[in-house]
């Protein structure tokens, strides 16, 4: 690994390549470029220290350099062990845009080391703001504060043996080692934090659970549920990146295959549309009767996963829940069935159970493509990206344009949280950005597509009781 500017990335010789791709991406990210133009001179984030835990891709590089252009200082890590694009990480370090701790193919120990490094600032206080994706940065801070309270009260260190979860074992080990060196690190960090903006459904679930229990230690902005994020990134981004990941990983023809999509939320809708468009016969599994009815009305079959195990060719989990595709399920699939996950965490597919299956044999085909062979009948299943995000593990994730929508929301959320330092509007709860900002994000992306909006006359606006400049829909409107 190469280290430069207090960073740790894989290969600094990739920086020039990364810069070329970043410059291309800027042309596809009009929202972020518009914010640089609007706010660059006034530097509204001047003095803000931002730590990011979000896939270190080319598109994220444009977000990082937008936040820097608005005055922030940044430290960054990836939120997935396979999602870093090493040339993008190198380019960001080379330009001194941020300190970066990320490389593709991290171990769990390396992943959490990178997370801690991104959160650890030279002044010892930690970041002012967080950009989080999946909630891992938020998680380790909260777990750290709990551990420090327990240690202060009883002298007891976190015990990695207290959990069967491989990831939490590493987290508890990291916290235990940290307590020996600095027993107040996470408490100081939490006290200094002004807020977090969260990118994903999974991370928002974590935040809402903490807020409900009154355990959230700082304000949070739910970026995921901005319309211009959830109805664009989650749907159209997955519609683009799922087939990209499957085809790069397996070279299999999708047309004619029977594909099971577990979950028909925004992500599942995009996945199902992609597979249908490629000629697959799509079956949806759902627990929610409304989503199930939507799937049927779109022309998909709706069935249980168990009924499809022996006949389907490809299984994709898109739920945000755990234990969706179990080891027992995979043992009943046809030979060389493909299993992938496009939800944030690897617990949607029971990788721990699969690896513990008696006599199971793991055969690596190529990076992020493994065939697991069951001893009973010597049949195997092909698992993509070790059960983690296949669109980022096996491909390059969502395209720049749709990520511009999401990251424009992220930037606006960071501006909002930094402004809250003065206005003190937010308590330790979870908030949405105003509808007017959601509409602004959409408006910033229309000109590059050659679109022209119709303008309401004063009479028309009065007739439906809105301002001619918007917002055009109530908060309750479902797009």
Image (tube, rainbow, N blue to C red):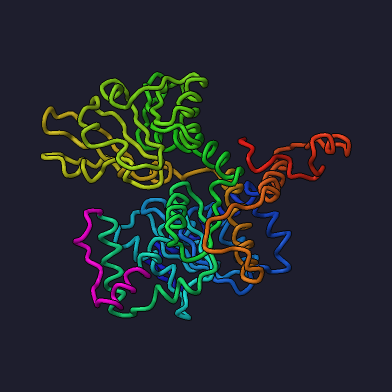
State whether residue 423 appears in this view: yes
Q: Is residue 358 left or right of residue 246?
A: left
Q: Would you place residue 83 above or below residue 370 in this image?
A: below
Q: Would you place residue 141 above or below residue 182 in this image?
A: above
Instruction: Please report the residue visible at 78 percent of the width from the left and 37 percent of the height from the top.
Output: 453
Tell whether position 329 is magenta: no
Task: Please state the horizontal and vertical placement of residue 346, each as a whole percent of the image.
Answer: 33, 46
- Which of the image's four quarters has the N terminus? bottom left
Magenta stretch, overall SS? helix
Instruction: Please report the residue visible at 66 percent of the width from the left and 68 percent of the height from the top.
Output: 423
Q: Is residue 442 left or right of residue 114?
A: right
Task: Please state the horizontal and vertical placement of residue 222, each as a whole percent of the image.
Answer: 54, 52
Q: Which residues are magenta?
A: 145-165
Q: Is residue 264 left or right of residue 383?
A: right
Instruction: Please report the residue visible at 27 percent of the width from the left and 71 percent of the height from the top.
Output: 176
Say which of 144 and 356 sits in front: 144
Toward the front, the furthest residue is: 213
Q: Would you place residue 286 above or below residue 370 in this image?
A: above
Task: Please state the horizontal and vertical placement of residue 296, each as a whole percent of the image.
Answer: 47, 20
Q: Quadrant of residue 255?
A: top left
Q: Quadrant of residue 173?
A: bottom left
Tell whether position 157 is magenta: yes
Instruction: Please report the residue visible at 60 percent of the width from the left and 54 percent of the height from the top.
Output: 23
Say which of 88 and 150 sits in front: 150
Task: Please state the horizontal and vertical placement of residue 479, each as a whole percent of the image.
Answer: 62, 35
State whether residue 94 appears in this view: no
Number of marks in picture: 0
């Amino acid at each position: 690994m190469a280290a430069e500017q207090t960073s740790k990335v894989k290969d600094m010789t990739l920086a020039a390549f990364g810069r070329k791709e970043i410059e291309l991406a800027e042309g596809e990210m009009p929202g972020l470029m518009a914010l640089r133009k609007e706010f660059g001179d006034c530097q509204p984030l001047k003095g803000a220290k931002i730590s990011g835990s979000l896939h270190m891709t080319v598109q994220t590089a444009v977000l990082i350099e937008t936040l820097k252009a608005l005055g922030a200082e940044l430290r960054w890590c990836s939120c997935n062990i396979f999602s870093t694009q090493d040339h993008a990480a190198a380019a960001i370090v080379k330009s001194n845009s941020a300190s970066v701790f990320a490389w593709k193919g991290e171990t769990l120990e390396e992943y959490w080391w990178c997370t801690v490094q991104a959160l650890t600032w030279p002044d010892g206080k930690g970041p002012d703001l967080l950009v989080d994706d999946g909630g891992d940065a938020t998680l380790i801070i909260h777990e750290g504060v709990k551990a420090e309270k327990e240690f202060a009260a009883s002298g007891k260190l976190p015990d990695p043996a207290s959990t069967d979860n491989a990831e939490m074992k590493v987290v508890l080990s990291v916290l235990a080692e940290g307590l020996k060196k600095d027993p107040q690190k996470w408490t100081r960090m939490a006290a200094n934090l002004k807020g977090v903006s969260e990118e994903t459904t999974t991370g928002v679930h974590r935040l809402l659970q903490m807020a409900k229990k009154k355990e959230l230690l700082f304000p949070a902005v739910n970026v995921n549920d901005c319309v211009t994020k959830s109805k664009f990134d989650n749907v159209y981004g997955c519609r683009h990146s799922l087939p990209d990941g499957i085809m790069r990983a397996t070279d299999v023809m999708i047309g004619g295959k029977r594909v099971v999509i577990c979950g028909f939320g925004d992500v599942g809708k995009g996945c199902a549309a992609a597979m249908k468009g490629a000629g697959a016969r799509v079956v949806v599994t759902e627990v929610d009767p409304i989503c199930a009815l939507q799937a049927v009305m779109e022309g998909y079959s709706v069935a249980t996963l168990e009924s499809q195990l022996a006949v389907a060719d490809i299984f994709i989990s898109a739920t945000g829940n755990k234990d969706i595709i179990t080891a027992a399920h995979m043992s009943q699939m046809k030979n060389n069935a493909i299993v992938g996950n496009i939800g944030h965490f690897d617990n949607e597919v029971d990788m721990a159970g699969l690896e513990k299956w008696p006599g199971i044999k793991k055969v690596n085909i190529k990076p992020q493509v493994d065939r697991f062979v069951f001893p009973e009948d010597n049949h195997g299943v092909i698992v993509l990206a070790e059960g983690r995000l296949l669109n980022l593990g096996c491909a390059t994730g969502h395209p720049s344009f749709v990520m511009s929508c999401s990251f424009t929301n992220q930037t606006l959320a960071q501006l909002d949280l930094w402004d809250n330092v003065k206005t003190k509007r937010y308590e330790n709860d979870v908030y949405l950005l105003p509808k007017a900002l959601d509409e602004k994000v959409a408006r910033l992306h229309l000109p590059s597509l050659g679109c022209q909006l119709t303008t309401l006359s004063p009479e028309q606006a009065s007739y439906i009781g809105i301002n001619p400049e918007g917002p055009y829909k109530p908060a309750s409107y479902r797009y």
